[in-house]
């Protein structure tokens, strides 16, 4: 990945090993946080560019995560990250532009099987990631840990609970019950067979369909964790057909009892919503915690 050029044209020229000028820019809608554009270059290439003048460091984590997913030996298609620029007031990330198409026959079956293959890889023996990243605009801490329950308790649940305390969106009862839940995690979550490379923000808005009709995963918050965390998040807002889960389970079955752990895994995202969007999510967070303590 090319780094260090403030001007995307310079970085893209180096990437494509030819002088490239942007001949057309058009806005791409749908993003939650950033200004997104399609850049058409005079060499014929089309590039997706995300720009941001706020949250420093937002794109480094995404770029490193895209790179890890792109290099993984198997899994769904991922846009190739091309160039990154960061300074105090402005950052941008350029990646392969994905042309949108319609789902091919067998789309869900293939997508499910590809996610299973992504998760099957056992290359990493610890939980965490080489880089911290963001979940929405909230920092996501990926400090390496040897144990999954310790990782999930410390860097997912406790981190969000502490943030909620500081943001003034959690009451004392949620914080106390949350602490009890973290203590109980070793009983509630089996240690996974191995750490899997996770998308990390695997909801229905974070995949596209390419011109061949196949799924492309975008906008990740990558770390090595229990694959149940990705599958649980897919269920949080819906958008994944039943054939996706069936194909996943056929390819790489999940440990018994996973259905009972879905809400526990999604508590992380509900707490993140509490922090991002306020007390409207307090009741849901309290109900989940109460179920598991
Ligand atoms: P944000 O981080 O602001 O939420 P996303 O990464 O979700 O932005 O991108 C916003 C929208 O841009 C997506 O919903 C999708 O429609 C489109 N998009 C994202 N990545 C690409 C890409 N590589 N090529 C083409 N379109 C993309």
Image (cartoon, helix red, strand yellow):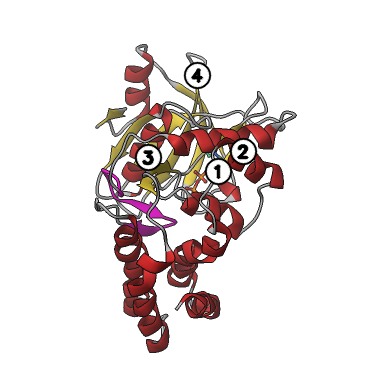
**Residue 131 falls inside the magenta stretch:** yes
Q: Which residue is mark 3?
A: 65
Segment colored magenta:
127-140
**Of the residues under marks 2 and 4, which one precedes in the sequence?**
4
Please, what secondary structure does the residue beneath circle 4 have? loop
Residue that label 2 marks: 250
Percent x, y for residue 239?
66, 50
Q: Which mark is residue 253?
A: 1
Which residue is rendered at x = 31% and y = 58% of the image? 151
Q: Name the residue at the front extreme.
A: 256
Mark 4 and mark 3: Cα distance apart in space: 23 Å
Q: Nearer the viewer, residue 191 or 13?
A: 191
Whether residue 253 can be seen here = yes
Q: Earlier in the sequence, mark 4 or mark 1?
A: 4
Mark 4 surroundings: few (<14), some (14-19) or many (≥20) residues within 10 A? some
Q: CA distance from mark 3 to mark 2?
A: 27 Å
Picture layout, residue 235 above or below residue 208: below
The furthest residue to the right: 105
From mark 4 to mark 1, how far is it between C-alphas? 40 Å
> Disc 1 vs disc 2: Cβ atoms closer than 8 Å?
yes
């Amino acid at each position: 990945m090319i780094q260090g050029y403030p001007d995307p044209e310079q970085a893209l020229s180096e990437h494509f090993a030819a002088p490239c000028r942007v001949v057309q820019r058009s806005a791409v809608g749908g993003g939650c946080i950033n200004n997104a554009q399609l850049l058409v270059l005079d060499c014929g290439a089309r590039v997706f560019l995300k720009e941001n003048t706020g949250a420093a460091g937002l794109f480094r984590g995404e770029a490193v995560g895209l790179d890890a997913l792109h290099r993984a030996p198997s899994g769904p298609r991922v846009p190739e990250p091309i160039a990154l620029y960061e300074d105090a007031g402005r950052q941008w990330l350029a990646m392969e532009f994905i042309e949108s198409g319609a789902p091919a026959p067998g789309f869900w079956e293939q997508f499910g099987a590809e996610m299973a293959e992504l998760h099957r890889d056992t290359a990493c023996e610890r939980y965490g990631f080489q880089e911290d990243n963001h979940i929405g605009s909230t920092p996501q801490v990926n400090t390496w840990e040897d144990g999954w329950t310790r990782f999930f308790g410390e860097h997912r649940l406790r981190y969000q609970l502490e943030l909620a305390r500081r943001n003034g969106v959690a009451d004392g009862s949620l914080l106390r019950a949350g602490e009890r839940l973290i203590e109980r995690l070793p009983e509630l979550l089996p240690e996974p067979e191995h750490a899997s490379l996770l998308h990390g923000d695997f909801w229905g808005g974070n995949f596209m369909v390419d011109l061949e009709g196949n799924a492309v995963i975008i906008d990740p918050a990558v770390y090595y964790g229990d694959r149940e965390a990705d599958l649980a998040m897919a269920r949080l807002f819906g958008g994944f057909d039943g054939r996706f889960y069936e194909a996943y389970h056929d390819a790489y079955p999940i440990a018994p009892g996973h259905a009972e752990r879905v809400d526990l895994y999604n508590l992380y995202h509900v707490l993140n919503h509490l922090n991002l969007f306020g007390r409207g999510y307090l009741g849901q967070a309290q109900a989940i915690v109460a179920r598991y303590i």
